[in-house]
């Protein structure tokens, strides 16, 4: 399970997404995440799904990497969807529904509070079912978009982009460079710490440690032999990184120059315009059909 967490990994490549300015990648992908929550019917959500799929293809990152990243959160997605399905009753507004009539699948609109299933204290309604499906799709899209950013952007470029985007905060004496450096280092070491955790777990299992049987308290106690070496390893890596930065005379962002200066190019402006058009289309499509979610 730990090896399935791929966020924070960078995969070098020469795709269109790789070549984009990292600032524009952050801007467009943040905009997409925002509009994932604004898509409220099948047409707008379908457009978002199609656009994200196109970006996945343009990134030339193997699809198995995206699915590997989703594998680690499938339980969270299903659990969240189930909670929404059971606890959201739906309102009296119209909600899209499909039903077999005379051997054919027909599309119709029904009341959102129409009951589909009722057991014990739980009631599944049409509105609650659609809400759960949309929540699941939103979680999946957010993970895919976030993973795409780290897959196609090196830690160095990510640091430079965050620092440039947060540049105006320097006017109020916010240490922008240091914040960007800390964020990037934390993101960079996620895969390293996960790999270290897996090695420690395998070593403990080879010594006879049982981490899968027993109650919650016993499993929590079984994690102690993992957490202690992991903390020690993390502090050791932090000290080694600090020593390496001192040896390279790192003293913060004051007076630093860059070998590669970030400049917007035609492909960045084109990507921004396409993203803006998709966002505008989502807003327009939301007005053409009743919302399936609240």
Image (spheres, grey):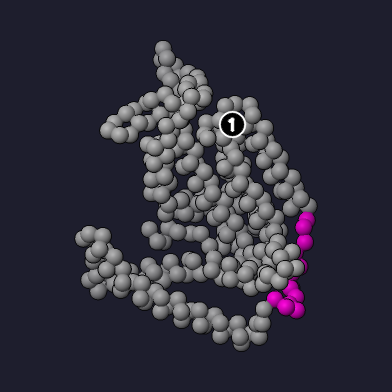
User: Taking 248 as reference, is 9 above or below it?
Assistant: above
Q: Which residue is mark 1?
A: 43
Q: Quadrant of the N terminus?
A: bottom left
User: Taking 71 as reference, is 94 above or below it?
Assistant: above
Image x and y of residue 177, in percent = 67, 71
64 with respect to 54 (left or right): left
User: Taking 85 as reference, is 4 above or below it?
Assistant: below
> Which residues lie in the magenta part?
253-265
Is residue 61 or residue 166 the one in the foreground?
166
115 with respect to 139 (left or right): left
Residue drawn 46% across and 79% down? 235
Residue drawn 69% across and 45% down? 275
Secondary structure state at the residue bearing disc 1: helix
Is residue 80 or residue 16 the one in the foreground?
80
Residue 50 shows in the view: no
Image x and y of residue 4, in percent = 42, 58
**Is residue 121 covered in magenta?**
no
Image x and y of residue 143, in percent = 52, 51
- Residue found farthest to the top: 102
Residue 180 shows in the view: yes
């Amino acid at each position: 399970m730990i090896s399935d967490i791929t966020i924070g990994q960078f995969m070098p490549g020469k795709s269109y997404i790789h070549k984009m300015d990292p600032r524009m990648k952050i801007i467009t992908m943040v905009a997409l995440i925002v509009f994932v929550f604004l898509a409220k019917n099948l047409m707008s959500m379908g457009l978002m799904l199609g656009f994200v799929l196109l970006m996945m293809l343009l990134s030339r990152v193997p699809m198995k990497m995206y699915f590997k990243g989703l594998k680690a959160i499938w339980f969270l997605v299903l659990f969240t969807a189930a909670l929404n399905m059971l606890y959201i009753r739906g309102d009296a507004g119209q909600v899209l529904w499909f039903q077999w009539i005379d051997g054919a699948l027909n599309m119709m609109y029904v009341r959102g509070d129409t009951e589909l299933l009722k057991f014990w204290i739980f009631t599944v309604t049409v509105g609650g079912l659609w809400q759960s499906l949309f929540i699941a799709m939103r979680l999946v899209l957010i993970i895919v978009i976030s993973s795409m950013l780290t897959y196609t952007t090196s830690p160095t470029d990510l640091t430079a982009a965050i620092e440039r985007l947060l540049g105006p905060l320097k006017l109020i004496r916010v240490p922008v460079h240091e914040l960007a450096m800390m964020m990037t280092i934390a993101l960079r070491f996620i895969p390293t710490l996960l790999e270290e955790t897996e090695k420690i777990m395998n070593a403990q299992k080879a010594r006879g440690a049982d981490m899968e049987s027993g109650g919650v308290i016993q499993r929590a106690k079984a994690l102690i032999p993992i957490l202690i070496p992991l903390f020690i390893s993390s502090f050791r890596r932090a000290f080694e990184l600090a020593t390496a930065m001192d040896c390279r005379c790192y003293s913060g962002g004051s007076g630093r120059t860059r070998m590669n200066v970030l400049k917007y190019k035609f492909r960045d402006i084109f990507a921004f315009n396409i993203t803006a058009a998709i966002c505008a289309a989502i807003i327009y499509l939301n007005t053409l059909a009743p919302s399936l979610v609240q």
